[in-house]
Image: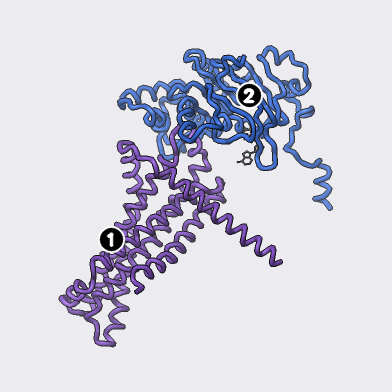
Amino acid sequence: MILDGLAGIGRQGLNFFATMGRAGIMLFNALWALPNIKKSWPLLLRQLYVVGVQSFAIIVVSGLFIGMVLGLQGYTILVGYGAENSLGPMVALSLLRELGPVVTALLFAGRAGSALTAEIGLMKATEQLSSMELMAVDPLRRVIAPRFWAGFLSMPLLAFLFSAIGIWGGYLVGVEWLGVDQGNFWGVMQAAVDLNRDILNGFIKSLVFAVVVTWIAIFRGYDCVPTSEGISQATTQTVVHASLAVLGLDFVLTALMFGE
Amino acid sequence: MSDNAYVEVKNMTFSRGERVIYEDISLSIPKGKVVAVMGPSGIGKTTLLRLIAGQLKPEKGQIIVDGENIPALSRNGLYEARKKMSMLFQSGALFSEMSVFDNVAFPIREHCKLPEDIVRSMVLMKLNSVGLRGAANLMPSELSGGMARRAALARSIALDPDLIMYDEPFAGQDPISMGVLIRLIRSLNDALGLTSIVVSHDVNEALSIADYVYIMANKKIVGHGTPAQLAKDDSPLVHQFMAGEADGPVPFHFPSQPIEEELAEVLK
Ligand SMILES: Nc1ncnc2c1ncn2[C@@H]1O[C@H](COP(=O)(O)OP(=O)(O)OP(=O)(O)O)[C@@H](O)[C@H]1O
Ligand SMILES: [Mg+2]
């Protein structure tokens, strides 16, 4: 019984490391060579559109609502201490440090990550990747690399957009609706937000999340069992693994950045 | 014959997990000829093509294409070697997000720096030769199975490679397209001096097109020769395949226990 359990853990451990190895090799082979700018640029643009621009709407709407909720909750809590003038920094700091990068990454995993996995998995199942390989075109560079870079470039921008819209949502609720003083809202916020500590750290976070989420998504597609069931499983795994990885990493990064 | 062989497989063994697909087989494909590979379904014909293209690695033995041992090549070497070959997939494998035109143009655009109007005329010529010039602007999802396969054929001959491997080019074709395809494969081969491997179940078509034929069964090559030689071959394996009989030395069934036993177990 115990031995079986141990063997099971061992097997899972080995599996885990083998998967990590395959994922590492895939990314390395996709990215190590210098891309041919003339050919890669249109591919990258197209993926930036699919991965980045098409995620715009969900990011804007979510950012607005989260900012509005922050404004409302923050106000009801702060007003009890007579501290409603701190509403600005509260909204801004929670968005820039945490909610912007984290929620964007979660939304991105669900919106763009799952689509990447399904698309690549289907290309594998229908032998499109194989036939590309046989035409002496490396699918890692033609298919995988532009999708990776598109995710890497668009997520930090989306996170920034999310925070900006969120702050505006907080302003709408706090200032326009609940009557917090406009000058206080912006002034205290400006004094409290630090470029390095808050904005830069949030940016670093979303870069890390971008790598992790995009990497998981494309690897799950590339490594999937090439059947309809395999693809659906891979898509689910992308969302679950990417979300867990983001939340776990967020704790680690927060501890490194803000823990004394 | 091995002096002018373009592809040579030497003492190759390959298995999928526990199941041995090929046991110590050797064969050679002479340069400039059309060679047919025939054999029952599931025997490993597609696998053989993937081995030659370096997508699968054999456990033992050598696969020499144009003087290079494919399994021993580095990643880059393999991609270089593949520029000389091309393969028509059994499923067609067209890129679903591109039109038929862009599919055929894909290998040309990837490997040659040509002005767009030359690419255009090359593609239209290839599409014309498979009868699909009018379908250039359709998406793969708008094609029938047979049309998709012909479009894929146009794509695989787009760059006039030295070696073309056709996996079941005739499946799903009506008699007219079939005749056109046979003449096309033949004339590509003769006009450009390329080497062709045609995988087919279709005994008549394969015999009519091939200069040389290999018949596989039971992990081995059970017969080979020119079509005329095979027609006279009286070994029971070859005879069974040529005549299309279910009973004989080549089993029709995937390896399994006898059906009586299995049904008895089910009914118990
Ligand atoms: N990815 C795979 N994993 C495990 N076994 C496989 C895989 N692909 C094929 N096989 C096995 O290898 C054997 C040979 O397959 P292959 O596709 O080469 O057959 P084939 O001769 O081309 O058949 P057909 O004429 O029906 O296309 C089959 O019996 C199949 O079960
Ligand atoms: Mg096959």
The N terminus of chain A: image quadrant? bottom right
Q: How far across and down, in percent of the image, does residue B227 sit?
A: 66, 15
**How far apart are the two marked residues, 1 and 2, measured between alpha carbons?**
59 Å
Question: What numbered label is drawn on residue B37?
Answer: 2
- Chain under label 2? B
Color of chain B here? blue
The secondary element bearing badge 1 is classed as helix
Q: How far across and down, in percent of the image, does residue A66 sit?
A: 33, 69
Q: How is the image coloured?
A: by chain
Color of chain A here? purple
Q: Is residue B31 visible?
A: yes
> Mark 1 is on which residue type?
Leu
Task: Using a 10 Å C-alpha cutoff, classify the residue at mark 1 as few (fewer than 14 neighbours), some (14 to 19) or many (20 or more).
Answer: some
Say which residue appears at 83% left-offset and 45% top-offset: B261
Above or below residue B155? Residue B141 is: below
Q: How far across and down, in percent of the image, does residue B124 sit?
A: 39, 23
